Image (cartoon, grey):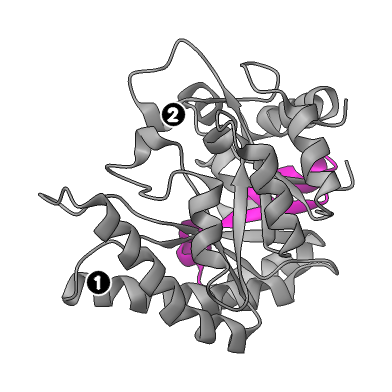
Amino acid sequence: MSRLSLNTATINRADLATALDVTVKAGIPAVGLWRKPVQDVGLAEAAARVADSGLRVSSLCRGGFFTAVAGPVRQAALDDNRRAIEETATLAAAGAPGSAAVLVLVPGGLPPGDRDLPGARERVAEAVAELAPVAEAAGVTLALEPMHPIYAADRGVISTLGQALDIAEAVTGVGVVIDTFHVWWDPDLPRQIARAGRAGRIAGFQVGDWITPFPADALLARGLMGEGHIDFPAIVEQLDEAGYRGDIEVEIFRREIWDADPRVVAERVVDAFRVAVEG
């Protein structure tokens, strides 16, 4: 429980004040924040509320979406990521001791009409390299998140932990986020987790289960730990052996969860974490 963090996407209909309140009352010591609730109240007010909550900040979601070709759309994405770096630094500084200034980067999918997957991946690498010095100056770790291949077209052209590490290891101060939902299927996962640990590149760890039957909207396909097919103790052990000692965020995208009372969801998160993750 000391490492449990509630990613606010799990209670995505709660405003920032509610999200912080239910996290505290559930006895969860850390929170993973999303940018929209922060922007709804303004960065200064959000930081003040985080400070008052006494919670650690485990990450800020999300930056990224780097696959547009050169032009105004790509420039707008880079500018937005610079703002996200500032937000990450401010919120981490406001959090309790042990907070992590980690900005989660979703790579982005193929631009409209584009079928050049290798080219899109190269543009992700170029954007990460361009932003890395900005993040380093702000004390922020950029954390690239590989996504399950079903999202390669529209959200994440980086599909494996190995691909994410290839990009991260080429730049100083860039890490990866390991999300069980996205990487559990990969037969090379244990070797790549060990590689990430040796390189000191594990910036975050998120958990959510793979459920079947799959819903019509693939984005909303995550279950609470223990509801699906993922062997959480095995992956947690691999992260432990790799030296990761940071927070473990529970991040669930599922309509049934979103429609429920956030307080009830937070309690269910605690119960599922104790059973499936802590063992």
Whether residue 212 sits left or right of residue 229 in the image: it is left
**Residue at figure coordinates x 56%, y 58% from the top left:** 165
Q: Could you tell me residue 75's position as x and y percent?
A: 26, 77
> For residue 74, which numbered disc appears in the image?
1
Which of the 4 quarters of the picture holds residue 68? Answer: bottom left
The amino acid sitting under disc 2 is Leu
Give how far across and how far down residue 136 sits, in percent.
60, 84
Could you say which disc has been placed on residue 16 in the image? Answer: none
Under mark 1, the amino acid is Arg
Residue span colored magenta:
18-42
Instruction: Please name the residue shown 60% across and 58% down the image.
Output: 176
**Local secondary structure at mark 2:** helix
Instruction: Find out whether residue 36 is within the magenta segment.
Output: yes
- SS assignment at label 1: helix
Q: Position of residue 94 (x, y in %)?
A: 73, 74
Instruction: Give the residue at the far top of this rendering.
Output: 213
Q: Is residue 2 visible?
A: yes
- Where residue 160 appears, x then y in whole percent? 50, 44
- The secondary structure making up most of the magenta span is helix
Label 1: few (<14), some (14–19) or many (≥20) C-alpha neighbours in 10 Å: some
Magenta region includes residue 5: no
Between residues 149 and 260, which one lies in front from this camera angle? 149
Q: Which mark is residue 220?
A: 2
Q: Residue at x 19, y 68 (%)?
A: 69
